Image (spheres, rainbow, N blue to C red):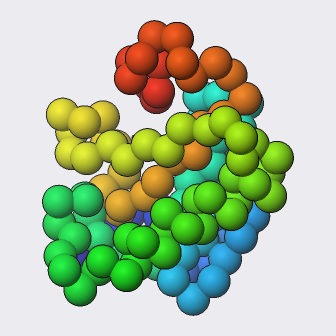
Amino acid sequence: MSDTIFGKITRGEIPSEFLYEDEQCVVIRDINPQAPTHVLIIPRKPIPRLVDADAEDGALLGHLMLVAGRVAQDLGVGDGFRLVVNNGEGGGQTVFHLHLHILAGRTMAEGGLAAGLG
Ligand code: AMP
């Protein structure tokens, strides 16, 4: 399986500030924020895309969602944020190591999905 920058970050090979970490995932600030709050929840397991996850990854995917909610609350945006997963080139994915984006701090309601990311 090809390595990515997120593999190096989760393994600590590239120094990065973890806003949160546990045995299954890390949370970092996006280097090119698309909203005042823009963080990434990255599993340590390098699943390339969401469609590459299988049944045995169900608990991990659920864990990532729970972490997203807790981190959003810790960052003070628990009452209004958007959670985004880009899947594949056609979905705007650029780093092929599954991750969730938390976006908050600007209006998400206007513009529908197109206002989400990118
Ligand atoms: P995606 O387009 O869903 O694959 O999202 C990849 C995201 O990773 C983009 O929003 C990038 O700005 C972000 N990114 C890429 N490299 C880094 C890095 N070294 N540290 C933090 N965020 C990064």
Marks counted in the figure total: 0
In the rendered structure, the answer to whether residue 104 lies left or right of residue 89 reads right
Image quadrant in which you'd find residue 97: bottom left
Q: Residue furthest top?
A: 111
Q: Would residue 42 be visible to someone looking at this image?
A: no
Most foreground residue, 113 or 37: 113
Residue sitting at x 62%, y 58%: 69
**What residue is rendered at 25% in x and 59% in y?**
50
Is residue 46 visible to the viewer in this orientation of the structure? Answer: yes
Give the x, y percent position of residue 14.
61, 69
Give the farthest residue toward the front.
Answer: 79
- On screen, residue 92 versus residue 28, left or right, reads left
Image coordinates of residue 90 in percent, x first then y, are 18, 34
Residue 39, percent from left and from top: 63, 49
| Image position, residue 86 (x, y; %) | 33, 43
Res. 108 image quadrant: top right
Q: Nearer the viewer, residue 73 or 101?
A: 73
- Name the quadrant containing residue 1: bottom left
Residue 110 position (above or below residue 92) = above
Q: Quadrant of the C terminus?
A: top left
Task: Give the residue displayed 25% in from the left and 47% down from the top.
Answer: 87
User: In front: 69, or 52?
Assistant: 69
Q: Is residue 93 above or below residue 49?
A: above
Question: What residue is at 42 percent from the left and 17 percent from the top?
Answer: 112
Is 109 located above or below residue 85 in the figure?
above
